[in-house]
Amino acid sequence: MFSVQTFGDTGKMKDYHYTGPVEHRFSPYAFNGGTVLAVAGEDFAIVASDTRLSEGYSIHSRDSPKCYKLTDTTVIGCSGFHGDCLTLTKIIDARLKMYKHSNNKTMTSGAIAAMLSTILYGRRFFPYYVYNIIGGLDEEGKGAVYSFDPVGSYQRDTYKAGGSASAMLQPLLDNQIGFKNMEGVQHVPLTQDKAVQLVKDVFISAAERDVYTGDALRVCIITKEGIDEQTVALRKD
Amino acid sequence: MALEDICNLRNSCLHQNWLPASPATSFLMTDCYNLGLKGPKKSQRNNEVPLQFFIPPLLNSTSFLNRSPSSYFQGNPPVTVRRPFPLSHGTTTLGFVFQGGVIAAADTRASAGGLVACPEVEKINPIHSHLVVTSSGSGADCMLWERILTREIRLYQLRHKRCLSISGTAKLLSFMLHPFKGTDVCVALTLCGWDKELIYVCSDGARLQGNIFSVGSGSPYAYGVLDRELSWSLSNEEAISLAREAVFRATHRDAYSGNNVDLFHITAQGWHQRKRENLKEEYYRDMKKRGLF
């Protein structure tokens, strides 16, 4: 049967729309989807991302996680244009090695965040189309989350969602972790197990409503013992 | 060539696109990956910006050659790459001078398109103990330029053993921003200093001294409240409550401003930051007070 779209308001079949010749410019960017999330706790940090890599209506890969380990105490999540994500993580790795060789110590999370801000702003006139979130432990061992915009503006947060489903997840996190817009509720600090469970639930919700999020969830839990990775299945449709 | 040096042409990536250079120097010049290949960034002259920018090469070289010669030496052709994402904009910041010093106030919302990218940004940042800068325009531009300005002021202090004056700081910032005039760098900063001076510097090139400035999408509403009650002889408490009221009314009417209000009071003893206040409750308190709730 003909779908509703082919019939216009008057009931007659719509003509194929020809709006005149259109010039298609080459765009150096593509949008590959994906969602990243980071939560900071008292002595831990969690960085989680889905593993779907899509472009337009196609899925390129179901196993392309967006969390990249930088040091023993820092993980970065990058979503947006996959080409820029790969190059950016390569540059960060190179700069980390250079720092290690010239200063004989590993970069701290705060220092990595400041450096990333300068790297991103150096491309102010041809930006990296990447939404970054760094999660890790600061010098005192407390959890730290640094969220970035594509041109390098950053700040330290307690929790942040970035990527295609960020607009859906951020209000949920505001409510559950920040206790925003809740009256008469006791502000209980977040334990590690509760945080991991919350992250899993939040991604299951995101996969329901965002087409670019799904397939699997990769969770990296950063504590002073090291980085622990878990994989959880999500909707594959 | 002397002219090349003054116009900083040698440092731009454009230089080796149309002037032949030896393979060794051309590799060092394109540090588009920010790996620090050219050595530590020096800021010898005051207008040399201590940050390397990657300029995308123009796709159509014939139109480039036909343009006027003055644009060759800018080192900054107009951007040919369209951004697929919105940047943070929209704000209300204000500053005014009165007998007790200078007050700087701002909201804390950063919006990107229609989304609130961050509800708790700090738009007022101290440069040193007696100088504070309020930022508006694009969030990333303001943050990075403030970092660059802080670095330059600190270097000046170390080299010359004294603090640069506020007008000097404003001039320095204005000259550093000048190479980016015409690009889409959007920075509008108000420098508030201890000497009861308030200077507005903008990426279009404006550098204005005044007694009262309000910048941003919510500034018309803030000006309305300020112009009504501002006078030189306000007490400290009155000035603080006036600034707070102006920001509150602006956040109420402007969609791109909101969340909290930050307040700084700068005197000869330095800056003093008032505790950040959430404006959500303020609206209900105000309605109740006026009997409309």
Image (tube, rainbow, N blue to C red):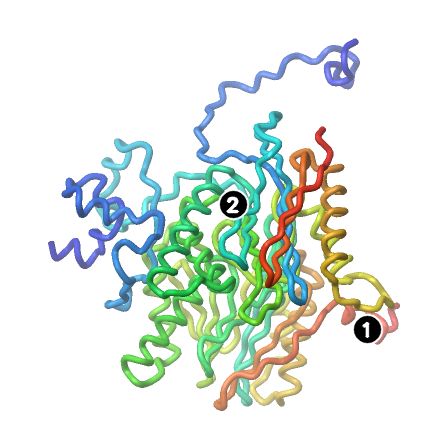
Q: What is the crowding at mark 2: few (fewer than 14 residues within 10 Å), some, or many (at least 20)?
A: many
Marks 1 and 2, how far apart at CA: 42 Å
Q: Nearer the viewer, residue B209 or B176?
A: B176
- Under circle 2, the secondary element is strand
Quarter of the picture containing the C terminus of chain A is: top right
Chain under numbered label 2: A
Residue lying at the far front in this picture: please name it: A225
Compared to residue B114, the image places residue B94 above or below, namely below
Compared to residue A2, the image places residue B240 above or below, namely below
Q: Position of residue B271 (x, y in %)?
A: 52, 83
Q: Can you tell which mark lies on residue A197?
A: none
User: Residue B273 falls in which quadrant of the image?
Assistant: bottom right
Looking at the rendered structure, the number of numbered marks drawn on it comes to 2
Chain under numbered label 1: B
Q: Where is residue B213 in the image (x, y as percent from the top left)?
A: 52, 71
Quarter of the picture containing the N terminus of chain A is: top right
Q: Mark 1 points at which residue?
A: B285
- Under circle 1, the secondary element is helix
- Horizontal side, residue A145 vs residue B144: left or right: right
User: Residue B242 falls in which quadrant of the image?
Assistant: bottom right
Q: Residue at x 57, y 46 (%)?
A: A67
Q: Where is residue B172 in the image (x, y as percent from the top left)?
A: 33, 70
Q: Residue at x 76, y 51 (%)?
A: A197
Q: Name the residue under label 2.
A: A130
From this viewpoint, is residue B47 visible? yes
Mark 1 residue type: Arg
Q: Are marks 1 and 2 on the same chain?
A: no
Q: Position of residue A61 (x, y in %)?
A: 58, 30
Mark 2 residue type: Val
